Image: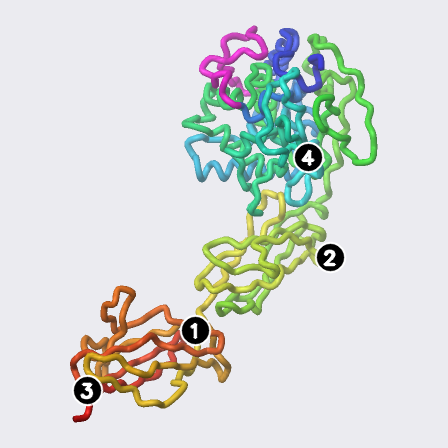
Amino acid sequence: MAAQFGRRLRRGATTTAVAAVAVAALAASQGPGAVLASSGADSGGDQPSVGSTPPDDPAASGNSPYYTDLPPLVSPNKPGTSTNLPITGSAQSGIPASVLAAYKKAERSLADSDAACRLPWQLLAAIGKVESGQARGGRVDANGTTFSPILGPVLNGQGFAMIKDTDNGVYDGDSTHDRAVGPMQFIPSTWATWGQDGNGDGRKDPNNIYDAALAAGHYLCAGSRDLAVAADLDRAVLSYNHSNEYLRTVRSWFDYYRRGTHEVPDGTGVVPPPLGGGTDPSPNPGTSRTPSPSPSPTPPPSRKPDSKPTKPGGGSKSPVPSPEPTPSQTLGAVENAGTGKLTATAGDAFAERIKVRAKNSLGGPLAKVSVTFTIAGDTDARFEGGKTAVTLATGADGTVTAPVLQAGEKTGRFTVRAIATGRSLPAVPYTATVTARQADAIARTDDKALTAAPGAEFADTVAVKATYRGAVASGVAVTATMITDGGTPVENDKGPYFKDAGGNPVRTLTDLKTGADGTLTLPKIYADDTTGTYRLRLTTEGGATVVIELDVEAPAA
């Protein structure tokens, strides 16, 4: 595949002419003077930069091909910047909603886990643009997963790196050689090390933009890199794909996005042209698209500052901006729709169900908004079907109700979060509490006298049954204690006792629970050498109590 401007370039195929075009475009973009940590402006497209990652280090994309389209020669204004900057159309500066949300979510996550790295989301956006054209213009589902896999060419050493299969074809469908996978184009062996679960669904999927963006962030922040330092940022980008041409292209888009960008609906972003080396179907399944002839890799004619911006790659026709959604169609907020107190006894279903409302920018209800409910915290509570996360869409009234929440056996508080799927809006948190099973009555199951000789064991066992409001109380916690007589009984230090696992005397047992039928049979009880009448107290969660007498008597003469 010959090197072509406006198409992916294989490693080693970049020409000096194309490199010059990239440098010229970077300079003309009027970006904020980021310095490339390179050995010189005329260094070859695949020559390493000063201090960059050594060539034998693995790259995230296996030095696969990438898009060399450059941003327009003028950049969009960013609020607060000079008003004298030229303005460009909205198509190239628009990033699909789910893709943009994934980049920003990854930036926040890295700010918490590795604040010293100072990862800017615009760097992820630049790499995403160069690697996959922002997931083919944002063609992702409600969870952020691409509708079909984005695969790079086979890395069989014929024009590309030689990487034999490392995943048995699980990610790339090739059990002989590896291929770069997903919107951030990870090779499977690198994904095995750096893969992340960015959307909290319990999976690490390179075809999911949330997972891939977070993984890319961790990869770029490897070691002690500070991406606010130009040299460290260059090293990070070169570690992704070891090519100076790649670095210049990513830098161009990075500077462009830092000047300002905006959100566009998923699937309406600028779609890169089809590729010859990898799987890159047309934007609309079922339709075909004939790519226009690629221009030769020569510098385009210079343009006047006031000329209209052209399509990246040298096309003469300006892209038509996608229509912006009206305020009534724009999601403004997601809020609690009147959910009551969330409390349930262990093992029971929560009577209250979580409900949220989506509102548009005018404050009215907004239908068909995808909302994801996720259980977080140290709990074994689950939605129906044993799920920890479910995604549903709002109805005509803008509301959506989560499935029934089932409490587990673990007591305490946990959180359920509701968030507009793929959006950067804050989550709506709900606190739920699981209380222990209770009993309001406990009694012996028989009335046999409990006696033993000094130093012997009691022949009969103690069995009790717990109930709650007359019904069997299963799984109720019970504490058994040998107590003293008197108005304020405490644990007795003499008389009958239980034995621990080591055979040592103990006079208090905890962590006892009633069975499915509400009954509990205590371990064997032993007598010491002191005769007399003693008391055993059993107390349930919920406050039910029963006191049982134990007699230690010398045998009759």
Name the residue beneath numbered marker 3: 532
User: Which disc, if any, is residue 460?
Assistant: none
Q: Could you tell me if the residues under marks 2 and 4 are in contact, i.e. CB atoms within 8 Å?
A: no
Which of the marked residues, 4 or 3, is nearer the chain's N terminus?
4
Q: Which residue is mark 4?
A: 149
How many numbered tags mark residues here? 4
**Mark 1 or 2, nearer chain start:** 2
Viewer can see residue 325: yes
Sequence order check, earlier mark of 4 and 1: 4
Q: Residue furthest bottom?
A: 557
Name the N-terminal-most of marks 3 and 1: 1
- The local secondary structure at tag 1 comes to loop
Residue shown at 75% from the left, 36% from the top: 323
Q: Residue at x 31, y 76 (%)?
A: 524
How far apart marks 4 and 1 lie (CA) works out to 51 Å
Closer to the chain start, of discs 2 and 4, is 4
* Range of magenta residues: 31-58
Task: Please report contact status of discs 4 and 3: CB closer than 8 Å, yes or no.
Answer: no
Residue to which mark 1 is pinned: 476
